[in-house]
Image (spheres, helix red, strand yellow):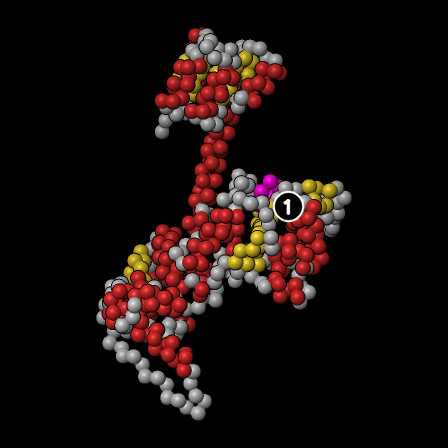
Amino acid sequence: MRQPHILVVDDEQVTREVLSEFLATQGYDVTAVENGPSAIQVVKEEPVHAMVTDLRLPEMDGVELLEQVSQVQAHLPSIVMTGYGTIANAVRAMKAGAFDFIIKPVQLDAVSVVIKKALEFHQLRQENLLLKKTVREQYGLHQLIGRSEEIRTLQEFVERVADSDSTILIQGESGTGKELVARMLHVNSLRRDRQLVPVNCGAIPENMLESELFGHEKGAFTDAVSARIGRFELAHGGTLFLDEVGEMSLSLQVKLLRVLQERSFERVGGNKTIRVDVRVLAATNQDLEQAVLEGRFRKDLYYRLNVIPITVPPLRERRSDIPLLVDHSIQRFNVAKQAGITGVAPDAMTHLVRYDWPGNIRELENLLERLVILKKSGTIAVSDLPEKIRQRAPFSVEPGDSVPQPDLINGEGINLMKELERYEGHLIVEALQKSNGVTSKAAELLRLNRTTLIEKLKRKGLDAKVYVGSNV
């Protein structure tokens, strides 16, 4: 591995030689040039990890060099040497982006210390940039997996409102991905370079939640042995995500309302007003309108939070996305668990699509993780699925099965529409299996227009691609 590359820029040959020899003994790869244009050419041609430059140079001075180098290689840590150790020169260099400055005649030990700090700073900056890039990729809009109309609508809406600074209320059942939506909103907002601070209002005891949100002063209560800042202060300039906000007590709702209105608060046990610049995202699996009617949630706070409402649909309302979610999860768990699951058998996928998933995506992912761990390789079959899922696939058929006969009408009667729906679904699945998942062929077998069949598939949550390779 190549050693850190240091660029030395000084019009005095003696200084260049002394610094080059010394830095080489410290294990650095050194390039020394006598002027700014030569330095810029070096930076253009090869990576430079730090630059040491004199402030006074022919053709362009050190500050001009810093400005031009930053256009070629942003964030290059640079140390300025000057024999004119005035505050004005130091300030000018630092404003131009210098990491530090040293006074001539230079002390070699001092140069070594400053360069080491500059390289450490550069490494941390690069790791931070990489981490931010990874986070942006992890929580980009593409992470809302699915092609259903519901997901496309959600993606478009998140993209439209992410840059607004308005408060957003994310509603949806448990396990639908509300926290993922909150992280996507933050990562795609103008506050993406600052923190997203999450608070689970339902997981923190009520007597501790106020201190968690607003902080406390030393001695505010028995265990307050020192002052502590709260989540609102931590999120200053960034985003605060209040998960399960419906679990918050009425007394705390009053204090939250004040922060949303005035952007200020006092720590527990304190009297100093603290102002914050925070965007608030809130999430709940409760019906807050009903909670307002029942007196469990303040109406004024509800309207403050519900400036921009987002509803994350449950999995049963976007069944056509289940095959995509299954494939994505299997690939992810194959890597994480070092497994080799090749996919899901068509009849097993039918069961997965037809199951209602009360725990939504979280339940689906938990099941797939368990199946990948237990099966390790091969194709997931119907027999691998839990009994409760195998029982919830009324339209699945096995090769050779005939259309089941209707139940006899007994004294209690039957639900005619339900029976017709059941048989229609059975026939559609059988046609898809016989046509190898080709909808146009399945429509011919059923004497339907292809568009009519497509609408029926959407309504029943069936995906024709599941039946490719299932010709019976």
Residue depicted at 37% across the width and 55% down the height? 328
Q: In which quarter of the image is the C terminus?
A: bottom left
Check disc 1 and report its element: helix, strand or loop.
helix
The magenta segment: 228-240
Q: Position of residue 437 (x, y in %)?
A: 27, 64
Q: Where is residue 374 in the image (x, y as percent from the top left)?
A: 36, 62
Q: Position of residue 357 (x, y in %)?
A: 45, 66
Q: Quick check: can you spot residue 5?
A: no
Q: Where is residue 465 in the image (x, y as percent from the top left)?
A: 30, 62
Q: Is residue 47 above or below residue 269?
A: above
- Which residue type carries mark 1? Phe
Q: In this view, does 75 lie above or below 420?
A: above
Instruction: Using a 10 Å C-alpha cutoff, classify the residue at mark 1 as few (fewer than 14 neighbours), some (14 to 19) or many (20 or more).
Output: many
Count of marks placed on residues = 1
115 on left or right of 444: right
- Which residue is identified by label 1? 232
Q: Quadrant of the N terminus?
A: top left
45 on left or right of 228: left
Residue depicted at 48% across the width and 40% down the height? 132
Q: In which quarter of the image is residue 195?
A: top right
Q: Quadrant of residue 23?
A: top left
380 on left or right of 110: left
Residue depicted at 58% across the width and 63% down the height? 286
189 in the magenta segment: no
